[in-house]
Amino acid sequence: MTVTRELALAKVAGKRPARRRFGPAFWGGAGILGVILILAGWMSFWPMHDPFAASGTPLGGPSAEHFLGTDNLGRDTFTRLALAARTSLVISGAAALLGAAIGTFFGLIAGYVGGWVDAVIMRVVDAILALPAILVALVVGVVIGNGPWPLILALGLVFAPGFARVMRAPVIALRERDFVLAATLSGVRPHRVIAEHLLPNVLTPLFVQFASVASQVVLIEAALSYLGQGVQAPEPSAGRMISEFTRFMQLQPLLIILPSLVIILLSAGWNLLADGMQDYLAPRREPAFSLGGRSKRRLPRRAKTAASDSSTASAHDTRTEQSRTQQSRTEKRPS
Amino acid sequence: MNRRSWAGTAAALAVVTLTISGCSAGGGGDGAEEPAGDPVAGGTLTWGVPAEPSAGGIDPMVASAIAAEVIYSMAYDTLLTRDDDNKIEPALATEYEQVDELTWVFQLRDDVTFSDGTPFDAGDVVYSFETRKDGGTNATYLSLMESVEATGDHEVTFHFSEPDGTFLDAVSARQTFLIVSEEGYGNATEEERQTTSFGTGAFQVTEWNQGVSVTMEKNEDYWGEEPYLDEIVFELYPDENTLLAAVQQGSVQAASFIDGSLAQQAEQSGFTLGDAAFRQNLAIYVNPEAGPLSDVNVRRAFSLALDRQALVDTAMLGNAGVSFVPPAGDPGATDATKLPYHQRDVDEAKRLLEEAGQPNPEITLSYMGDVAQAHHPVYEMMQQQLAEAGITLNLKSTPLAEIAPIFTTGESWTDLVAIPGSPRASAAFYLEPVLLEGGVYNHWDGNPDADKARELLKAAKSAASPEEYTDLVAQLANEAAEQALEFVPAAVPVYFEVWDGSKLHDYENDAFYSRSALDRAWLSQ
């Protein structure tokens, strides 16, 4: 059973829920990641040039054959950048997925079981949250070696506590709700309650946290590769490209501008996706993401329609209903 | 943001990108040098360096880092020295004679004073050699020296247990057997020895501001012609890109680069780029105790699969030389292209691998991932070349701190480890740590593949004449290549030196990176 806050509140308010749409943030993020994914897939299966062998003169500029030029070993920059983006995308997605799986598991347990189990799990979470992610990744690299998989493992573990914390809070609120109590009282076993009744209702923060963590992983992977401890040669990596090609900054500046842009785009893509999903799944009064000031031409029209703006009204109602729900929950607790 | 704003932002980004990419190198000076005129005394030369002395500071008996060598070789002198044509010249000794196979006698200058004011005599030479033999750096170079004695105020006699074929090379190398003041150095604390100098050189270290600069001042008591420069300040720029910026801004009048491509960019900015000798091997040491490299045919196939000229031309952008042991720029070097298994032959490499029963061996190469980035393309390109012969080379980027125990305490490694080697005083010394007992890179004890090379090395060290020594060193290089006991993809200069020819005059770098020409160089006022 899936009960979203909005559906419930709309029902209380006697209204049909407004049809929601993905905003520009979501489409911006999904678009960036989609384009990168398509280019990376294209270059993985049908590369224009061998990404690991020289196909032109070293440090060549953009040309018809190599439209982003070549690196110091004469390898095609576009092909290698596409593969670097793929590597970064895979690492960020996989590390976030691993973190989400572990964090969600412990978050659900902590939130649902409560008591000392909750206390123990959350203290461990607090301890791990105190560790800097890049330091943990460096240590894991030293102990079990460098490369994509150790990196995914290290970052997945480091970011899992964040997921656990994000999952625990809504589960604590949900476990007292009628539908959960009803399921429990009718003899549904705890693991089914968690899997079928609680998990589907906490997916909103999970998705948002997933994209947000993926964005951070992109930056950490780039930093580690810059330090020579991330993805190893000959696999291309945007961070390592920046590190290696700084020495050619004056001879061929594109060699460090382009990988920098890849990192920026990947990180921004995940961040925009997180924001877009946040706006879609749990709309706020003011969008978290704005590309600029409101268009002056649109202001009067908005002003005219302000009174009938359903989203504003529903948001207002939401707050009212939230306080009501909280009141009733507080009242219910002693019983 | 509306569509128009998006388009505007994209256009602006494109303009910025294109503008930056259009501003490629070539923005430096024109490199034209005006007539220098007569030398002028005075002035401070600022020299940018990428590294400063590390363990042992600038103590010539303890420190072995190249960054220390280039400084203490200016502050201290040796008994003999060499010119760029490898001809022996007098320094603190005026004459030398090999009385018999086991005895050398040196006549010393009698007009030399140390920077602390004490006069130089035979006692200082005896003290310096005994201190070095008793646990100083390169003490192994004196393993055959039985004793050294003062046979006059300005005469010393060396006695050897066996003929030493390397002694003349070592005693005339500019960074090896430096002479210290028995009184000044002997009575100084460890800290004083590591931060100041007690030598007879033209410039003495007066201040070392760690992490910032090393200052050398003119030695007023210098026994040679009085230097023109008052002071030389070596400013530290750990990031060579920053050093290049300092060169282009004119913050330094000279600089040393490890990265040849950056030195070339400095040259494009109007600086003079010295013609440096390739005296540093990008050595790759073998651990044959386990894995595919225990088979000599796999090692030979590895060597045959490498296209060394392509590594030099592409990976090092021409800033290197094809080399084996000793390095291509070393006086005792043999022509590496003529050594066994040093001309690329992929088919033969595949045949050897088949013969070894390992058509697709997997080999791990550890290299310093956090330093010497200019060398990394060599390893990547080797990986491509070896793949064509069916050899998978796994590159393992390892921090310097993790690799350091290999060359400090002799810790083991897997398959291959790449450690750029320091220049050594004599040709036989390069394979000492690989072949002789106790050598930090020695994993060949008990391995018959290295027996002949070991015997040749011992014979070379005990050679009775320079001709015999040269012949044995050549045989040793041939045998080491035949058995593929070590791999050398290329040799590079220790430093690429650049200087502003319009400000610093009469300076030329030397094959021994000792900057000895600073003794006579002068600055425009």
Image (cartoon, coloured by chain):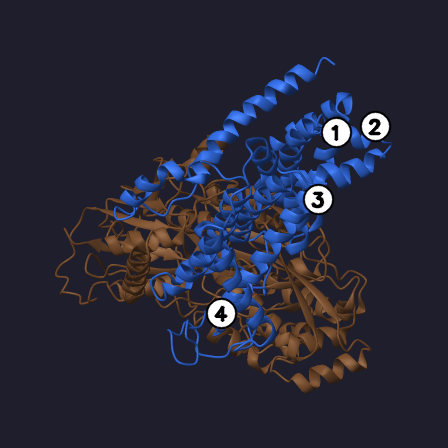
Chain colours: A blue, B brown
Q: Residues within 10 Å of mark 4 (few under 14, many from 20)?
A: some
Do labels 3 and 2 touch, CB within 8 Å?
no
Of residues B149 and A56, the one nearer the viewer is: A56
Q: CA distance from mark 4 to mark 2?
A: 91 Å
Q: Chain of mark 4?
A: B
Q: Amino acid at mark 4?
A: Pro
Left or right? Give the position of B211 relative to B470: left
Do labels 3 and 4 touch, CB within 8 Å?
no
* Secondary structure type for disc 1: helix
Of residues B381 and A144, the one nearer the viewer is: A144
Which percent across, then down, holds residue A52? Answer: 57, 72
Q: Are marks 3 and 4 on the same chain?
A: no
Residue carrying label 4: B331
Q: CA distance from mark 2 to mark 1?
A: 15 Å
Q: CA distance from mark 3 to mark 4?
A: 63 Å
In this rendering, the label closer to the viewer, 3 or 4: 3
Against B252, is B163 above or below?
below
Q: Amino acid at mark 1?
A: Tyr
Q: In the rendered structure, which disc, 3 or 1, sits on the residue that comes first in sequence?
A: 3
Q: In the rendered structure, which disc, 3 or 2, sits on the residue that comes first in sequence?
A: 3
Residue carrying label 2: A185
Residue carrying label 1: A112
Q: Amino acid at mark 3?
A: Ala
Q: Chain of mark 3?
A: A
Left or right? Give the position of A108 relative to A232: right
Q: Residues within 10 Å of mark 1 (few under 14, many from 20)?
A: many
Q: Which mark is residue B37?
A: none
Q: Amino acid at mark 2?
A: Leu
Of residues B287 and B98, the one nearer the viewer is: B287
Q: Is there any visible trace of residue B172 in the rendered image?
A: no
In this rendering, the label closer to the viewer, 3 or 2: 2
